[in-house]
Image: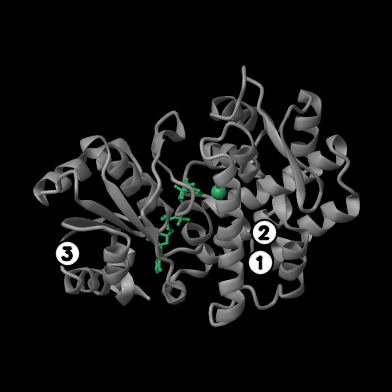
Amino acid sequence: MLNQLGPLCSKAGLSGNCLVITDENVAGHYGAAVVKSLESAGFTVAKTVLTPGEQTKCGDQLFNLYSECIKAGLDRKSFIVALGGGVIGDLAGYAAASYLRGIRFVQVPTSLLAMVDSSVGGKTGINIPEGKNLVGAFHQPELVLADLDTLKTLPAREYAAGLAEVVKYGIIFDAPFFELLEKNIDRLSDVNEVELLARLVGRSCGIKADVVAQDEREGGLRAILNFGHTVGHAIEKVAGYGEYVHGEAVAIGSVYAARVSVEVTGLSQRECDRIERIFPALNLPVTAPGYAWQDLRNALTVDKKTVGGMPRFVLASEIGTVSFGNEVPEALMEKIWNGMV
Ligand SMILES: NC(=O)c1ccc[n+]([C@@H]2O[C@H](COP(=O)([O-])OP(=O)(O)OC[C@H]3O[C@@H](n4cnc5c(N)ncnc54)[C@H](O)[C@@H]3O)[C@@H](O)[C@H]2O)c1
Ligand SMILES: [Zn+2]
């Protein structure tokens, strides 16, 4: 579908010149096709290629992008194309949200995580040394184009990480979808299972869009998308960004949240076991050996979802039904963690 990008941008009402922002891993595979499609549709195209990795989602790179925007002659009518995973999507999206007080942008997600999560919903931003995603803006893309063929070059570990978010949608919103994942567990990791993959990506985006349409700015309901992320983000921070990729930390955080749910919101042990089983079957970790509770607890306090120093958890009462804003007693938080390391 990448060769449809130019015509689809025209159809979405975009015009003028644009800057394609991508990273080195993605540029070699898809950069030329994207530029060609945009140029054929009459757009003037500049491209900038960044270093891959979470470290790129930072203030220095953001300011570098503003300079690239100026160099490319972008004005208020121009737009940015984010071609890559969630790092590129978040960074390029925030550049679009802030350059000239906001220009339009398009998401072309190429990682599974970006397709099912970060490219939809309008959250953009960067990391600062104090924590992940602490600076950003809500800025909706004009268009999201997810070409499943691009997943064929995605490293297996990154693909598995994306599946963690897919599983999350089943847990928070859709028990039959969770069951579908369980039934097809051996086929989920095969990128050639195109029809199944289209169902996974389609349903995941559908759930995310549904939730965000009800609560764009996270006044309430949108928080359910953070299932597994309270502890997940803390793990990423304590381990140092990079040791675990985002989806892996979310898998561990999801098992943690499920175990807490058994104690606090009455999730049955049987359903907790189902959640614990699904992640290893997708080559995702469910424990984080060697990380002390106190370090994790300190990291929880910096997370932006804390209220008055107390972290809030999304917890399940059954698969498909969750509640948000749950406080968990200190002793229980610690006990559950110590049972996992
Ligand atoms: N905005 C949101 O709502 C939201 C939601 C979830 C996550 N995020 C953010 O997303 C980021 C993680 O995204 P990610 O997992 O996509 O990471 P990423 O962007 O770092 O991509 C993972 C790796 O895969 C490579 N890659 C991507 N597509 C490829 C392809 N088709 N072929 C070969 N290599 C490819 C990238 O170069 C990178 O090395 C985090 O920063 C996280 O905070 C944002
Ligand atoms: Zn996530």
Name the residue beneath numbered marker 1. Answer: 282
From the viewer's perspective, is residue 326 above or below residue 102?
A: above
Q: Percent position (x, y) of residue 255?
A: 73, 49
Q: Earlier in the sequence, mark 2 or mark 3?
A: 3
Q: For the residue marked with disc 3, what is the amino acid?
A: Phe
Quadrant in the picture for residue 300: top right
Name the residue beneath numbered marker 2. Answer: 167
Name the residue beneath numbered marker 3. Answer: 43
* 151 vs 277, nearest the viewer: 151
Judging from the image, the colouring scheme is one colour
Q: CA distance from mark 2 to mark 3?
A: 38 Å
Q: Percent position (x, y) of residue 98?
A: 28, 37
Q: Secondary structure at mark 1?
A: helix
Q: Percent position (x, y) of residue 333?
A: 76, 31
Q: For the residue marked with disc 1, what is the amino acid?
A: Leu
Q: Percent position (x, y) of residue 134?
A: 44, 32
Q: Residue at left 34%, top 47%?
A: 93
Tell me, yes or no, whether the two marked residues, 1 and 3, touch with CB atoms within 8 Å.
no
Q: With 14 as the anchor, is 261 left or right in this view? A: right
Nearest-to-viewer mark from 1 and 3: 3
Q: With 109 as the anchor, is 7 left or right in this view? A: left
Quadrant in the picture for residue 10: bottom left
Nearest-to-viewer mark from 1 and 2: 2
Q: Earlier in the sequence, mark 1 or mark 3?
A: 3
| Quarter of the displayed picture in which ligand 1 can be seen | bottom left
Q: Secondary structure at mark 2?
A: helix
Q: For the residue marked with disc 2, what is the amino acid?
A: Val
Badge 1: residue crowd in 10 Å (few <14, some 14–19, many ≥20): some
Q: Quadrant of the N terminus?
A: bottom left
Q: Secondary structure at mark 3?
A: loop
Q: Earlier in the sequence, mark 1 or mark 2?
A: 2
Q: CA distance from mark 1 to mark 2?
A: 10 Å
